Image: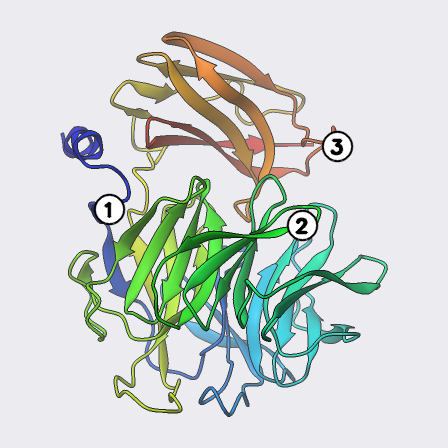
Amino acid sequence: MMLRCYAALLLLFPLAVVPTFGQTVTTITDEFGGSGDVAVGPDGNIYVADFGVSLSNANGTTVYRVTPEGERTVFATGLAGASGNEFDPDGNLFQSNIAGSRVSRITPDGMVSTYATAGISGPVGVTVDADGNVYNTNCQTPGRISRTTPEGTTTTFASSSLMSCPNGLTIDDDGNLYTANFNDGRIIKITPDGTPSFFASVNNARGNGHLTFANGRLYVCNWSGRIYEVTLDAQVRVLAGTGALGTNDGPASQATFFRPNGISASTTGDTLYINQSTNVVPQADPTLHPNVVRMITGVLQTVDVESDPGEVDGLGLAPSVPNPFYERTQLTYTVPTPTAVRLRVHDVLGRTIHTLVDSVEPAGEHTVTWDGRDEQGRRAASGVYVVTLDGANQRVARRVTLMR
């Protein structure tokens, strides 16, 4: 019944008008020094970088590993102002060092090495494309984005006055980059050929933190005390936060945030992890420590496939057959009316590895086969994958296990 009420609300109110419905904000850690970006790893843990104690003193040296239950350990040290971070498909964490003007690579066992330095100045956001190219923002005006190839060659990928201290950086399924300006609240889109353009503005004031791409949309932290959701057609809405500054948990429409900075989605896309300062005192040179990690659950009406029949208002996704599978598995889905749908396979990092359907489908039951390969025809590795069906602002999901 709740899901049907949610669907009715979406019909009554356009996405850009009202905050989303049904999300909950919960603090999961005690206070610690972790003021940089947040990345969810292949193991499902949350990796939190420490930028440092203030904007003018980026002295953080550590990346912490935090379990979804809030247990924290040191993952890696030896950084210099650890800001943006992102995992590659092999489980390496790329970490920018704003005070060291370099990008580091951290192996799954926590070993740190310098990955790129040439032409990098004030690096903040980091992301990785499907070909293994590593991109980082350079906090300047005009802003600049560098690209480092797997062979280690670093060049300027994009530069524009549209970027004013570009902070966070992420990439969508089509290879478009999105960066969030710290100085003016705008989001800039950069196409795969390096062409920047204005995309959206979440707030007229400074203070965009990092952003992430999940569920076919962007999620953005902003120092206004809000977390924003931005669709790829540039519709902006508040996901969580009243705009009052604080640390109150509870329903997303009542929760408060203070200088939220890093953000990353769980592998299913239904939970966001965010770090923020708890020192709720306005200052000319903002003190960033101490920090906590908070989670927003219920980000989408994602069906847990082991406990739910896999249907939302007639949009249905049946269990795959066979599961586990070796060579191929059949996926059957149902749409109640002619609907634009996307049926995709995601890896443990939440990345789309194969889009099976992306079209307007007639009402009724449809069946497709996944042969265990990615978009390039390469055999996917053994493991658990998440199949998602999106349509009419709803999502259902199923887990499937590939065995080699």
Marks 3 and 1, Cα distance to the nearest angstrom?
A: 38 Å
* Residue 42 visible, this angle: no
Question: Toward the viewer: 280 or 343?
Answer: 280
The local crowd at label 1, few if under 14, some if 14 to 19, many if 20 or more residues have their Cα within 10 Å, is many
Query: Which residue is labeled 2 in the image?
Result: 129
Please state the horizontal and vertical placement of residue 217, each as a whole percent of the image: 44, 44
Q: Relative to 320, does residue 384 appear above or below in the rendering?
A: below
Marks 3 and 2, Cα distance to the nearest angstrom?
A: 16 Å
| Quadrant including the N terminus | top left
Query: Which residue is labeled 3 in the image?
Result: 378
Q: Relative to 2, does residue 267 appear above or below in the rendering?
A: below
Check the image and tell me how it is coloured: rainbow
Please state the horizontal and vertical placement of residue 12, each as a whole percent of the image: 16, 32
Identify the residue shown where x is 28% and y is 69%: 225
Looking at the rendered structure, the kind of residue marked 1 is Thr
Element under disc 1:
loop
Query: Which residue is labeled 1 in the image?
Result: 20
Please state the horizontal and vertical placement of residue 356, each as a whole percent of the image: 57, 23
Element under disc 3:
loop
Question: Toward the viewer: 233 or 116?
Answer: 233
Disc assigned to residue 379: none
Marks 1 and 2, Cα distance to the nearest angstrom?
A: 30 Å
Identify the residue shown where x is 58% and y is 85%: 61
